[in-house]
């Protein structure tokens, strides 16, 4: 069968996160994968242990995106103060709305499952980026989220999309998929394909099943913009187009580590000079639906 090695992989809709990679003549030039069941959580694992296992930036984003929509669902928050709209932000100076639109989602019997899927994607892919790709560099990861949030907010206001959770999650998923583009991911009905296609598959499914797709396209566009200016262009031309502000590094001090992808290192630690690198080579919602 050939040599085997255990590698990380993210099943799109299950908690399986480990596969066994086997290289054989049948799959020459490709990566063939078989699932190996991951260890189940200990029965005595408490909520605190679960949360502490999530990197700091993802932890607070995940908590806010869980708690705030639930408060709205039970009538403790008024959704009229949470959604994003150009006129309210620009002309009426309600500048909090781009932030509340990031962490609020209108949970109803019709949207509840989709909200849970977004939380699942947020937990899996944001955690993976911060814990693996940006290992020890949570300030850089926070800057990535701020970059994506800024452009998602602008595009969503221009297109009358009222909530940012979905395009933001898709933008994060897109970056992960580009960093790990040759990792095989599993989708519905046993479909398996390289991660670089996952955002487009999600877009296609949403366009067919929900009649939407705009949110995924925004997430893909913004995620690609970040990936290009922050990772791909500096890697190819040796010039940093953007960099994390120093105050974010003071807010979240760096730990040992660099930026790594499962298909190869992307960029080294910030304090080291750049050398040769090898980088591996989606849904906010409208009021009334999208």
Image: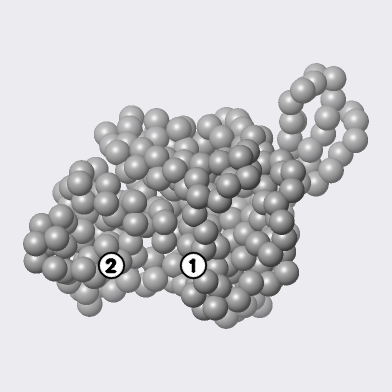
Residue 57 image position (x, y, % from top left):
51, 69
Residue shown at 78% from the left, 42% from the top: 20
Q: Which mark is residue 245?
A: 1
Q: Nearer the viewer, residue 233 or 221?
A: 233
Residue 139 image position (x, y, % from top left):
55, 68
Q: Is residue 270 visible?
A: yes
* Residue topped by disc 2: 100
The colour scheme is one colour
The image shows residue 10, relative to residue 94, as above or below, that is above
Q: Is residue 177 left or right of residue 183?
A: left
Secondary element type, mark 2: helix
Residue 246 image position (x, y, % from top left):
52, 71
The image shows residue 265, relative to residue 91, as above or below, that is above
Mark 1: give few (<14), some (14-19) or many (20+) Cα within 10 Å: few
Q: Is residue 201 left or right of residue 111?
A: right
Residue shown at 28% from the left, 73% from the top: 71
């Amino acid at each position: 069968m050939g040599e085997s090695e255990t590698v990380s992989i993210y099943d799109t809709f299950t908690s399986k996160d480990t596969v066994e990679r086997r290289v054989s003549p049948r799959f020459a030039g490709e990566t063939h994968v078989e699932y190996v069941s991951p260890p189940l959580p200990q029965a005595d694992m408490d909520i605190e242990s679960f949360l502490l296992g999530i990197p700091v930036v993802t932890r607070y984003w995940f908590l806010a995106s869980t708690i705030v929509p639930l408060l709205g669902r039970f009538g403790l928050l008024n959704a009229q103060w949470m959604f994003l709209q150009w006129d309210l932000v620009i002309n009426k100076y309600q500048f909090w709305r781009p932030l509340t639109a990031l962490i609020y989602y209108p949970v109803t019997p019709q949207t509840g499952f989709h909200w849970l899927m977004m939380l699942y994607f947020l937990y899996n892919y944001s955690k993976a980026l911060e814990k693996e790709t940006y290992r020890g560099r949570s300030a850089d990861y926070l800057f990535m989220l701020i970059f994506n949030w800024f452009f998602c907010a602008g595009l969503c206001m221009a297109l009358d999309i009222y909530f940012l959770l979905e395009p933001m999650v898709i933008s994060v998923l897109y970056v992960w998929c580009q960093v790990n583009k040759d990792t095989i991911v599993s989708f519905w009905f046993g479909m398996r394909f390289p991660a670089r296609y996952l955002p487009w598959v999600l877009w296609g499914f949403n366009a067919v099943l929900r009649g939407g797709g705009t949110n995924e396209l925004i997430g893909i566009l913004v995620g690609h913009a970040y990936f290009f200016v922050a990772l791909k262009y500096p890697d190819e031309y040796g010039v940093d187009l953007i960099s994390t502000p120093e105050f974010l590094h003071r807010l979240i001090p760096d730990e040992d580590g660099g930026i790594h992808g499962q298909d190869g290192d992307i960029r080294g630690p910030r304090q080291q000079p750049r050398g040769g690198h090898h980088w591996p080579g989606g849904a906010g919602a409208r009021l009334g639906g999208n």
